[in-house]
Image (cartoon, helix red, strand yellow):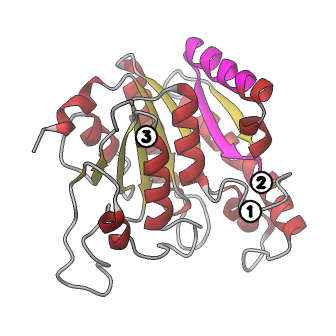
Amino acid sequence: MKNYRERLKDAETIVIKVGTSTITYETGKLNLGHLEKLAFVISDIRNLGKKVVLVTSGAIGVGVNKLGLKEKPGVMSEKQAAAAIGQCELMHIYNKMFSKYGYVVGQILLTREEIDFEERRNNVINTFSKLLEYNAIPVVNENDSIAVEEIEFGDNDTLSAIVSKLIGADLLIILSDIDGLYSADPRTDPEAKLIPVVEEINDEVEKSAGGAGSGRGTGGMVTKLMAARIATQAGTDVVVANGGNPCIIQDIISGQDSGTLFVAQPSS
């Protein structure tokens, strides 16, 4: 098998997606230790001269906690209000933590309209380009406060793949509470084994995907496969790994066997 991991060392433009379970505790409160490590690791990667975009989940969950609600609301207007409050809190924390390492952050909130309409899409691409040129770190989330459907993008796994495609990223790293793709559901099958490399997402690979993971997020392995398909077909390598320790990002870009690597498909 080819050593696809080796080429990850040369990735120049990297999109990193963090799930709700990576940046919050079971209580719903922010995991400041993880966020601190995340800011440190991304800043260190930027110091190498690489361009990094951060796609973050967690706005609704953080907003729910900030409002003192006992559970995630089911009514759309309540979700949107929680997202508006949570997004402010998230950006405040990201700005504070990245500034410790000399980097500024720029917020980009997206809906389908920004992607589906050419003029808006081009504006988004230009904004990403200019932020990266300014050595800023774009922090991306779906604009949940105005989105009329939670399934606008489906989840931030899909959003991260679309962002990767928009900016022509070399590598997409999806961090969650899932270690990667297994041969079967590891929660029910003790014989399940982690698959280190997937050269092509076919029917057999799709059958290996289980259901949703953490109850705090919206995505499971199925959505990550969908995201991997979008990104790899656009020429981006994708790694799905456990974000329990954000330092795994450094392992991935140094070519170590962490998580599952979905190999970028050659352009037709």
Q: Is residue 46 magenta?
A: no
- Name the quadrant containing residue 60: bottom right
Q: Residue furthest front?
A: 268
User: Where is mark 1, residue-wise?
Assistant: 150
Single out the mark in the foreground, 1 or 2. 1
* Label 2, residues with CA under 10 Å away: few <14, some 14-19, many ≥20: many
> Could you tell me residue 192's position as x and y percent?
21, 77
Residue 262 in percent (x, y) is at: 32, 48
Question: Which residue, given by chain and number where applicable, does mark 2 sit on?
Answer: 144
Q: Which residues are magenta?
A: 122-143
Which residue position is annotated with label 3?
A: 233
Numbered disc 2: secondary structure = loop
- What secondary structure is found at the residue carrying circle 3? helix
Task: Determine if residue 72 is in view.
Answer: yes
Residue type at tag 3: Gln
Do tag 1 and tag 2 residues touch (Cβ < 8 Å)? yes
264 with respect to 150 (left or right)? left
Kindly report the distance in space between the C-alpha atoms of the residues bearing marks 1 and 3: 25 Å
Percent position of residue 144, x then y: 77, 54
Residue 111 visible somewhere in the drawing:
no
**Quadrant into which the C terminus falls:** top left
N-term mark: 1 or 3:
1
Position of residue 65 relative to residue 13, above or below, is below
| Lower sequence index among marks 1 and 2 | 2
What's the amino acid at mark 1?
Glu
C-alpha span from label 3 to label 2: 27 Å
Rounded to the nearest angstrom, the CA distance separating label 1 from label 2 is 7 Å
Front one among 79 and 267: 267
Residue 149 placement: quadrant? bottom right
Going by the numbered disc 2, the residue's amino acid type is Asp
User: In the drawing, does residue 82 fall left or right of residue 40?
Assistant: right
